[in-house]
Every structure is written in structure tokens, then in C-alpha cells.
Amino acid sequence: KPRTCSSSVKVLKSVYGEVDVPEQTLSQFVFADAHKWRDLPALTCGVSGRSYTYGMIQQLCQRGAQALLANTDLKPGDRIGLLLPNVPEFTLAVHASLQAGLVVTYANPLFTVHELTRQFSSAKVRCIVTVPQLLELAQAVAKSLPAYDCTINVGGEPSPQNKILGLESLTSTEKKVDLPEVRSSDIAVLPYSSGTTGVPKGVMLSHRNLVVNIMQLLHPQLVEETDPLTFQDVSLTVLPFFHIYGFNAILNYLAKIGSHLVSMPKFTPQDYIKCLLEYQPTVLFVVPSLLLFLITHPEVTPRHLASVNKIFCGAAPLKKGLIDRFYEKIGRTDCTITQGYGMTETSPGITITPYNMPYSKSGSCGRLLPSTLARVIDLSDGHVVGVPNRPGELLVKGPQVMQGYLDNPGATSDVIDTHGWFHTGDVVYYDEDEYFYIIDRTKELIKVKGNQVSPTELESLLLEIPGVADAAVVGIPDSFAGELPKAFIVRKPGFDDMTVDSVQDFVTPKVATYKKLAGGVEFVEVIPRNPSGKILRNELKNLCSQN
Ligand code: 4UV
């Protein structure tokens, strides 16, 4: 259980003050000004060129909400699972569902049947929205969902006898259906995150959580200090909409301000380079490994990046060295690089860097968003550190903090203490000006190119291998991916012939590509554990750095 702090100690408050929160649902909030840019492009698929204006999106979502309730057995409050790549229709599926009072969970289309079944059955998904390329996968998952009703095959053929509906089920109906009243306190989405420990859990984010986080980014003083985006900007992203960064900090945020978002369903260097030239984006949303790609790929030249004047980076540490190398590559420094830090559990933003941040602070993830409070507690005794430049675990409080983990009050109280502080599991310090620096994690989470990998999930899988007596997985540093999962395995007596390849061959087909044991497999005599059986991951990490 997290230690509970006494309330008499120092609390850091955002220098930006507070935000007012409109009592609106996410869709009402995001599309409140859409009439202003009705005829401007909202979303374009960078590869196929398929494009929707704000007017089209708004109309399709409204009709879609009716169609979902009219053409299926879904009822408000039911869960809908999106198994979609980064296609413009992602927005239609999300906002039509939300307006119909459904709760949305979204998953990585690279997931295996096993991974998807776990998420969609935990979320009690009744309907899957997918594309023809993933239909077989969706149908394999659907078989194991007790409450399953139907699948919507976006861009594919309907097959009513198999309960497969076409896109029209998401966009048109003859029947008139009354839409339910959705409250801002209702749960809107259930993204999955492993949090500080264990396997991925459903994170209950309300409409208000998501709306607030965008409001926090739009706070007037912060906007002034962060070189704001406008409806005239063109953004390019390949970052997944099925992760909180892509979902709220990109997709919903850009829709709110009427910006044009060009998205790519899949990353290939050629497609990315083509999009840079074709769409001349003014803004790029990246994770550090994508920035490294831009810096190091020989075919990316300053000409490809000439239109870009803003870069947003988050989800993993962005080192000062990388920022310097990017400026060197483009031969200019008039492109702002803004770093955001946050978590799925905080919708996601906690801090952001202002564009006029002094050079000496490069590498900082910025200052607290408005209406956000923080405490840093000592790792050994749990007391509030209370002074700058001393590391400890970051605790936050704010209206963007989740409502809890789905059906898991135990996991919720493990991270939200009795005073309402959310324990991030990140080791940070702040300087005299209250700029934060992320230096480590106390939690188990591994981040591969910004994607979450849960060691517990991989360890459970490894323990299924006959001959594995014990297993532990840790993240080891990697200059490109940030971290890579590495397994330590204790073999049972008589299984000395177990090889690294046989372990990899067991794991690889069962997990999404980025979760592979790309950091290696090592056989050891014993997994170091504390007296209560907890794996001493730092000892294993130290072992790696000594080798
Ligand atoms: O739950 P999650 O996968 O969430 C994220 C959220 C990313 C973003 C992106 C843009 C933003 O503006 C924003 O506010 C948040 O990745 O993983 C949460 C963990 O990822 C690490 C940290 O360990 C979190 O607990 N992380 C996220 N952002 C950063 C980071 C960062 N800027 N620097 C270092 N670590």
C-alpha cells in the first residue's frame, strides 16, 4: 500500500493556477467550435489520402450514435472495443459511441488473440469495431466474449448471418432513436495500463477527466507560454490513437482547436518521409525513438523538415542530447520542442515544458499543468522531500486523475492513497523554479518506444514453459527503443538443455512485436527476491549493466 502523507507538509501548486471545467461530455467539448471550421479538413489518412472535414465528422458522429443504438442490441453503458489502426474512422467510432452513451476501450491491433481476449473480456466488450484486415482476429476474440453482440467491419463487407455489420451501422439509420443523456462524470473510456505493478488493468477515465486535461493545456497563460497550435497548423502523427497520448493529447486536443491531423496507420520510413513532403506538416507529434529516427535516417534531410516549427514529445524520457542533435540536423533552432509528461491514469498530462524554457533546463519535462498539485516523497522513508533537487517518488492530485481501475478496488487503493494522492511510480526531482525532471521509475513498467510492457505479463507467460522454475523480466537500456525487455530464467533440474532460442520461440508468437524479449534471455541460478517474495529488479538491472 502507498504510504499516506500527512497533510501538513509542502505541496507544490501549479504556477498557472486553476482551470474552470465545463460540465460537458467529451464530444460536446471537442466539437463545440467545429462549426467554425466546418469545411476545413479534420483528419486525413496520410497513406490513402482519405479525408474528412470537421462538418463531415460532426454529422457522421451524430448519425453514428443513433445508428449504433438502432442497428445493434447495444444499450447505453455497454462497452465497445476498438481494434483499429490509426485511421480517420477511429474518431467516428469513438465519438459516435460516446454520444450513444457507450464506454470505449481501444486496443493495439498488433495484439495477439490472447492479449486482446484478456482486455476485451475484462472490459466486457459487446461490440468490436475493426477493419477487414483485422476481421479474422476480431472474430477469434469475439468467440470468447460472454456479452458479445456484433462486429462492425469498417470499409468491409457486412455478413448479417455472422453478426458482422458494415460501416453504415456506424453512420446511418432509418430509425430515429433518442440519444441518452450522458453526464460528464460518466466513464468515457477504458484504456488498459499496467500502472505501477501487475498486468494491464482498465483505467476508468470519465468525460470530465479527458475534458479537463485538454482544458489544462488550453489555459490562457500556458497557451501563451507554449507556442500554441491553431486551426491553421497541419500535424503529422504515426503515434497510436489506441494509447492515451494519441487519444487525448493528439486526436481530441487537435479536434478541439480545429487543426488538421494527418495520421498514418503504420510506420514505415518511406511513408513517413513521403508524408513530410506531401503534407508539409507544421507540427510533429513524436516519442524519443521517432525523433532519433528523424535525426539518424540518411533519407531525412533538413528539406523534409523545413515546414516543421513545433514538435511535441512525450511517453518516454527525452534527453537534452537528443534535442541538441535534432537542432544540429535541421540546422536551425526556431522549431520549438515541447515535452509533456503524464500517464494513462492521468488522462494523460501532468507536466509540460513552456517554449521559453531556459536552455539550461533542457531535458526537464516542464511544470505542473494548471489545477495540478504535487508532492515528492523520499523513496526510503516516504516523507515529503519538500526541497528542490532531491529525488523521490512523484505524487499528484488533480481533476485529470482517473476514477480508479475497473473492477479492481485493491489495485486502485494501491496507487491512490486515503488523502487522494495518486502515486505515479516515477522518480523525479524539481528545481528551484519547479521544473520537473524524471530520472527513474520505482514501478515495474518497461517502456519500449513509448509502449507499455508489463513484466508481470511476460513473467506469467515464461512460467508456462515446461522446465521454467522461476522467471523475472526487467527493462534494459537501449539507445533506440529506450528500453527492451530482458528475461532471467531459473531452469528446473533436468531442463539444462533449454535454450535462449526455445524461450524466444515460445514467447514471440504470443505477444505483440514490441513485447518480444529483444533485450535477451539469461539463465541464472536464482531470481533475487525480498523476504516477501518481491523480485528485486534493480539487482537484475545492475547485473545487466555489469555484463
Ligand atoms: O501510461 P503511459 O503509457 O502514458 C504515457 C503518456 C504520455 C504522454 C505523452 C504526451 C503528453 O503530453 C503527456 O502528458 C503524456 O506514456 O506511461 C506512463 C509512464 O511513461 C513514462 C513515465 O514512466 C510514466 O509513468 N513517461 C511518460 N512521459 C514521460 C515519461 C516523459 N516525458 N519523460 C519520461 N518518462
Image (cartoon, rainbow, N blue to C red):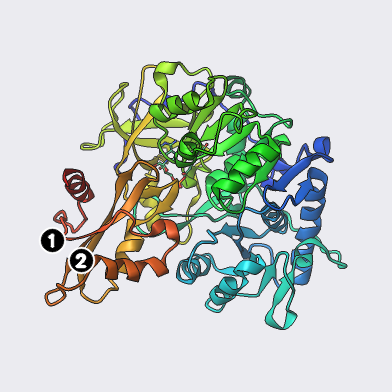
Asked if one can make out residue 498 in the rendered structure from this viewpoint, the answer is yes
* Ligand 1 neighbours mark 2 (CB distance < 8 Å): no
Please state the horizontal and vertical placement of residue 154, each as a whole percent of the image: 71, 64
Asked if one can make out residue 25 in the rendered structure from this viewpoint, the answer is no
Say left or right for 6 vs 281: left
Please state the horizontal and vertical placement of residue 126, each as a whole percent of the image: 61, 70
Quarter of the rendered structure image containing ligand 1: top left
Q: Residue at x 28, y 71 (%)?
A: 502
Q: What is the spatial separation of the Cα atoms under label 2 and label 1, in whole angstroms?
A: 8 Å
Furthest residue to the bottom? Answer: 161
Helix, strand or loop at mark 2: strand
Q: Residue at x 54, y 56 (%)?
A: 190
Say left or right for 283 vs 432: right
* Ligand 1 neighbours mark 1 (CB distance < 8 Å): no
Say left or right for 525 vs 390: left
Which mark is on residue 470? 2
Total marks shown come to 2
Mark 2 and mark 1 lie on one chain; the one further toward the N terminus is: 2
Amino acid under disc 2: Asp
Q: Is residue 493 above or below residue 93?
A: below
Kindly check if marks 2 and 1 are in contact, taking CB atoms under 8 A apart as contact: yes
Say left or right for 356 vs 422: right
Amino acid under disc 1: Val
Which mark is on residue 526? 1
Q: Residue at x 17, y 57 (%)?
A: 532
The answer to which image quadrant residue 417 occupies is top left
Q: Is residue 180 above or below residue 447?
A: below
Please state the horizontal and vertical placement of residue 149, each as a whole percent of the image: 65, 75
Q: Is residue 224 above or below residue 513?
A: above
Helix, strand or loop at mark 1: loop
Please state the horizontal and vertical placement of residue 133, each as a whole percent of the image: 62, 67
